[in-house]
Image: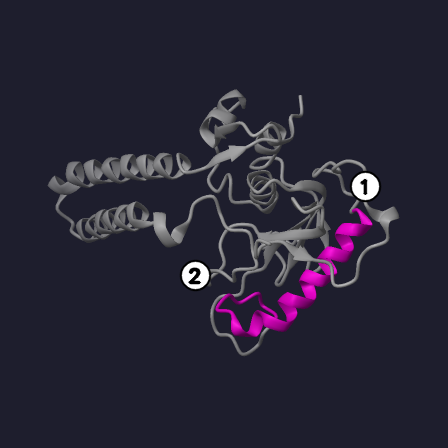
């Protein structure tokens, strides 16, 4: 049994098991997802003090507080056992992250060499621009503009290389890159962070490991979002800007 598959502590009543997966963009949270989320929240509450990430619920942590969206996907595994998968959107401060969570499609533990190298180069260019801008010599303006253009190009290429690592399985087992998925959208390109939300990560993992998705939900944990639209412990539908094109592909929506 894979370590990301979590059995329910108490077997849910069979009447709570849905016949088909709920709409991730619906505001109604299936009761069986509420049970899975309650079990996950108890686990987070018990273990978060030992993690580096500061959710804003621990007054002893001095790092910047940042709440996170977590997701649960109720599944049946290959052995027809009922349980759930869980993960978070984006990244936690902890690397490697706690093994119970479904990993990102981009494995920072093994694939981040080009990211680290690229970020070092971009930072170095930024530092050079800053140093030149502190000089009042007007003859340096062309050099500054050239460096800014170089930084922009390198950032764009690095983002493109990162997106090439996000290849999603759909319910039929067909793989499609996130760039190809977003080609039919008005902007044609994925927004930053596309592929790192909880719902696509959970569904990809389930499909890759032969699990049947039954119900999905996401909730916010920790300090409220900067805009105040996400509150601790509350459930929210999947986002439309980053998730909708990906989930429509994965689930076969028209």
Give the extent of the magenta segment: 30-57
Sequence-wise, the earlier of marks 2 and 1 is: 1
On residue 155, which mark appears? none
- Is 150 left, or right, of 15 in this rendering? left
Predominant SS along the magenta part:
helix
Provide residue 213's location: percent of width, then percent of height. Answer: 69, 41
Q: Quadrant of residue 209?
A: top right
State the separation of the CA atoms marked 2 and 1.
35 Å
Residue 76: image location, x then y, percent: 70, 45
Task: Say whether marks 2 and 1 touch (CB < 8 Å).
Answer: no
Magenta stretch encompasses residue 46 = yes
Q: Residues within 10 Å of mark 2 (few under 14, many from 20)?
A: few
Q: Position of residue 37 (x, y in %)?
A: 71, 57
Q: Which residue is mark 1?
A: 18
Residue at image location 49% in from the left, 28% down from the top:
176
Instruction: Identify whether 27 is placed above or below 225.
Output: above
Q: Is residue 27 left or right of residue 79?
A: right
Name the residue furthest front.
Answer: 79
Q: Identify the residue at horizontal 16%, vertical 51% (top origin).
A: 135
Q: Which residue is mark 2?
A: 95
Quick one: quadrant of the N terminus? bottom right
From the image, which quarter does the C terminus lie in?
top right
Q: Secondary structure at mark 2?
A: loop
Secondary element under disc 1, as helix, strand or loop, is loop
């Amino acid at each position: 049994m894979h370590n990301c598959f979590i059995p329910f502590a108490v077997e849910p009543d069979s009447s709570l098991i849905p016949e088909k997966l709920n709409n991730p963009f619906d505001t109604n949270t299936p009761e069986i997802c509420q049970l899975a989320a309650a079990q996950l929240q108890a686990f987070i509450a018990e273990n978060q003090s030992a993690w580096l990430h500061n959710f804003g619920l621990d007054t002893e942590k001095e790092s910047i507080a940042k709440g996170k969206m977590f997701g649960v996907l109720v599944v049946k595994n290959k052995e027809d056992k009922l349980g759930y998968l869980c993960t978070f959107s984006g990244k936690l401060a902890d690397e490697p992250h706690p093994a119970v969570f479904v990993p990102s499609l981009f494995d920072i533990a093994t694939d981040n060499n080009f990211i680290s190298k690229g970020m070092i180069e971009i930072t170095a260019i930024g530092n050079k621009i800053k140093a030149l801008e502190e000089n009042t010599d007007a003859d340096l303006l062309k050099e500054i503009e050239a460096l800014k253009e170089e930084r922009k190009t390198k950032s764009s290429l690095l983002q493109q290389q990162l997106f090439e690592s996000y290849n999603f399985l759909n319910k039929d087992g067909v793989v499609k890159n996130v760039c190809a998925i977003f080609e039919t959208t008005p902007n044609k390109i994925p927004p930053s962070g596309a592929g790192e939300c909880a719902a696509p990560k959970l569904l990809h993992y389930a499909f890759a490991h032969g699990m049947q998705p039954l119900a999905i939900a996401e909730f916010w944990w920790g300090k409220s979002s900067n805009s105040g639209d996400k509150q601790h412990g509350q459930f929210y539908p999947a986002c439309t800007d980053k998730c909708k094109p990906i989930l429509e592909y994965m689930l076969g929506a028209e």
